[in-house]
C-alpha cells in the first residue's frame, strides 16, 4: 500500500502543532524565547522576528543574546512603545507606517523588512504584557494572521507559566499602590507645630543668693531645705574658733600699744627721746586698733542672717557641715515661693527657631499627667556646658497658671513655628545627612 503525501494544509497544521508543543514543553524562558523567534520561521517565512516583553527585547531571530544597545533592538523597543499608544497594540494586525514617527520609519527601512505583523501577548485577563514583531518581504495573508494570532495565544500562556508577571507591573495594582503613596506624600505637607523636648527645672525668680562672706569651715546650718524664714533669722554659722583667737590677740596687742603710748606720753615732759617717739607709738596704736576692728568684723560674719522673708533653697545641709568654703561661694538661695520661673536647657542639636512668648508645656517627673503652661521669656545668645557635659542654650520662661514648687524637675515641650510634617519627622536625620555628606 502506497503512502499518500500530505496536503499543504495538513503540513501547515502539523507544523503549527509541533511549534505549539515545543513552546509548551520549554523548561526556561530563554528556551521559550528561542522557540518563538526561530521555530516558526519555516511556517511563515519571515526574515526576522523579535520578542518584546514589558517594553524590552528578549530575543531576536538568529541571535543568541540580543545586545541591549544595538540599533535594531533600540528600534524595536521604540516602535513597540509607539504602538502601545494606539489600539493596534492589543490586536494582531499588520503594522501601518503612519503609526510611527519619522525616525522610526527611517529605521524601519534601514533595519527591518517592509511587511511587519505585530502579534500581542496577553495574560488571562486580556492585558497585553508583550508582543512579537514578524518582518518579511511578502505581504501577510488573512489566514497567516489568524494562524499567528493562535500561536500568540499559546506563546503567551507558555510565557506566563514560566515567568509570571509581577503584580505591581499590572495597571490596576499600580493604581492601588500609587493612591496610598500619593496620600502619604500629601500628608507630609500638613503644617504642624515644630516642637522639641528639653530638661527643665523650676527655679526662684529674682531670688537672693546667700554666699560665704569669709573663708572658713561651716559649723552648722540653722535652717532646713525649703524652710520658711523671716528677715533676721539665723541661716548659717561658721566655726569661729580661729577668728575668736585672732580677735583676742588683736585686742591684747592694742592694749599693749596703748599702754606703751601712755607711758611714753608721761615721760615726754622730761625725756626728749620719748617725746620724739610719740607719733610713732600713736600710729602703732591706730594700726593695732584697725587689726582689732578687722578681726571683730570677721568674727561678726561667722553668722549669716536672712536679709528678707522667703524660703531657703538648697540641696542638703549635711553636705556643707564641716566643709571649708571660699569667700563668695554659693551656699543657698532665699526665694519667694510665689515668684518662680522655669529654666530649660535646650541641647544645641535640638535648637529651632523660637518666637517671643512661644508656648511651653512642662511635664514634671513627679506628676507627668498634669501639664503646666508657660511662655518663653528669654533665650541665651550663646550655649553653655551643662553639668551633664552637653552644650545647651538656657531658656527662661514664666508660668501662665499656678506655678509648681521650686526645685521640681521635668521635661518641657517647646513649640516653635508651623512647618510641614516632613520637616517635623525628618529634621534630625536630614541634619545628620547634611553634616555627613556636606549637602
Image (cartoon, rainbow, N blue to C red):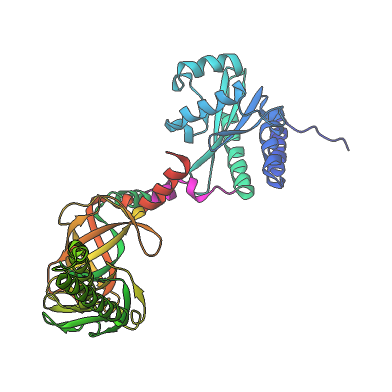
- Rendered image quadrant of residue 321: bottom left
Give x and y (percent) for residue 261. Answer: 19, 71
Q: Please state if 23 lies on the left or on the right of 367 as rendered.
A: right
Report the front residue among 348 and 322. Answer: 322
- Is residue 345 a member of the stretch shown in magenta? no
Q: Quadrant of the C terminus?
A: top left
Report the front residue among 431 and 44. Answer: 431
- Rendered image quadrant of residue 212: bottom left
Give x and y (percent) for residue 379. Answer: 22, 54
- Rendered image quadrant of residue 406: bottom left
Location of residue 401 with respect to 415 vertically, above or below: below
Location of residue 119 with respect to 162 vertically, above or below: above
Let me know if residue 406 appears in the view. no
Q: Please state if 203 lies on the left or on the right of 32 as rendered.
A: left
- Is residue 176 a member of the stretch shown in magenta? yes
Report the front residue among 113 and 55. Answer: 55
Location of residue 204 with respect to 384 vertically, above or below: below
Give x and y (percent) for residue 69. Answer: 60, 25
Name the residue: 60% across, 22% down: 72
Let me know if residue 346 appears in the view. yes
In this figure, what is the number of numbered marks?
0
Name the residue: 62% across, 50% down: 161
Q: Quadrant of the N terminus?
A: top right
Q: Main secondary structure of the magenta part?
A: helix
Give x and y (percent) for residue 159. Answer: 62, 44
Give the residues drawn in magenta, as a range: 164-178
Name, please, the residue furthest toward the right: 1
Q: Please state if 68 lies on the left or on the right of 346 as rendered.
A: right
Location of residue 115 with respect to 10 vertically, above or below: above
Amino acid at each position: 500500500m502506497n503512502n499518500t503525501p500530505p496536503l499543504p494544509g495538513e503540513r501547515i497544521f502539523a507544523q503549527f502543532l509541533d511549534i505549539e508543543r515545543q513552546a509548551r514543553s520549554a523548561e526556561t524562558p530563554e528556551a521559550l524565547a528561542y522557540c518563538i523567534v526561530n521555530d516558526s520561521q519555516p511556517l511563515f517565512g519571515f526574515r526576522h522576528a523579535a520578542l518584546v516583553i514589558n517594553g524590552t527585547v528578549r530575543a531576536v531571530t538568529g541571535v543568541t543574546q540580543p545586545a541591549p544597545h544595538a540599533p535594531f533592538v533600540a528600534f524595536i523597543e521604540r516602535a513597540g512603545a509607539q504602538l502601545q499608544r494606539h489600539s493596534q497594540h492589543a490586536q494582531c494586525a499588520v503594522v501601518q507606517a503612519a503609526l510611527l514617527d519619522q525616525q522610526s520609519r527611517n529605521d524601519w527601512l534601514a533595519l527591518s523588512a517592509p511587511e511587519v505583523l505585530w502579534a500581542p501577548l496577553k495574560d488571562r485577563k486580556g492585558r497585553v504584557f508583550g508582543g512579537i514583531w514578524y518582518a518579511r518581504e511578502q505581504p501577510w495573508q488573512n489566514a497567516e494572521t489568524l494562524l499567528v494570532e493562535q500561536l500568540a495565544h499559546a506563546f503567551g500562556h507558555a510565557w506566563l507559566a514560566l515567568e509570571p508577571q509581577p503584580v505591581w507591573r499590572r495597571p490596576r495594582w499600580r493604581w492601588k499602590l500609587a493612591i496610598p503613596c500619593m496620600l502619604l506624600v500629601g500628608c507630609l505637607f500638613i503644617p504642624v507645630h515644630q516642637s522639641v523636648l528639653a530638661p527643665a527645672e523650676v527655679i526662684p525668680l529674682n531670688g537672693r543668693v546667700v554666699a560665704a562672706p569669709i573663708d572658713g569651715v561651716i559649723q552648722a546650718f540653722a535652717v532646713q531645705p525649703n524652710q520658711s524664714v523671716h528677715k533676721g533669722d539665723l541661716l548659717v554659722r561658721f566655726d569661729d574658733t580661729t577668728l575668736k583667737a585672732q580677735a583676742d590677740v588683736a585686742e591684747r596687742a592694742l592694749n599693749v600699744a596703748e599702754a606703751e603710748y601712755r607711758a611714753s606720753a608721761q615721760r615726754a615732759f622730761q625725756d626728749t627721746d620719748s617725746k620724739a617717739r610719740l607719733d610713732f607709738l600713736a600710729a602703732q596704736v591706730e594700726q593695732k586698733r584697725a587689726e582689732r576692728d578687722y578681726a571683730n568684723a570677721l568674727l561678726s560674719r561667722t553668722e549669716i542672717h536672712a536679709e528678707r522673708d522667703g524660703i531657703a533653697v538648697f540641696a542638703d545641709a549635711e553636705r556643707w557641715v564641716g566643709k571649708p568654703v571660699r569667700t563668695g561661694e554659693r551656699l543657698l538661695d532665699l526665694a519667694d515661693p510665689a515668684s518662680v520661673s522655669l529654666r530649660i536647657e535646650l541641647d544645641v542639636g535640638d535648637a529651632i527657631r523660637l518666637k517671643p512668648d512661644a508656648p511651653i508645656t512642662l511635664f514634671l517627673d513627679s506628676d507627668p499627667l498634669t501639664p503646666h503652661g508657660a511662655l518663653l521669656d528669654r533665650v541665651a545668645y550663646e550655649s553653655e556646658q551643662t553639668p551633664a557635659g552637653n552644650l545647651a542654650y538656657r531658656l527662661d520662661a514664666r508660668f501662665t497658671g499656678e506655678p509648681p514648687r521650686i526645685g521640681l524637675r521635668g521635661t518641657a515641650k517647646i513649640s516653635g513655628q508651623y512647618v510641614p510634617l516632613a520637616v517635623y519627622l525628618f529634621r534630625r536625620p536630614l541634619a545628620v545627612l547634611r553634616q555627613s555628606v556636606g549637602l
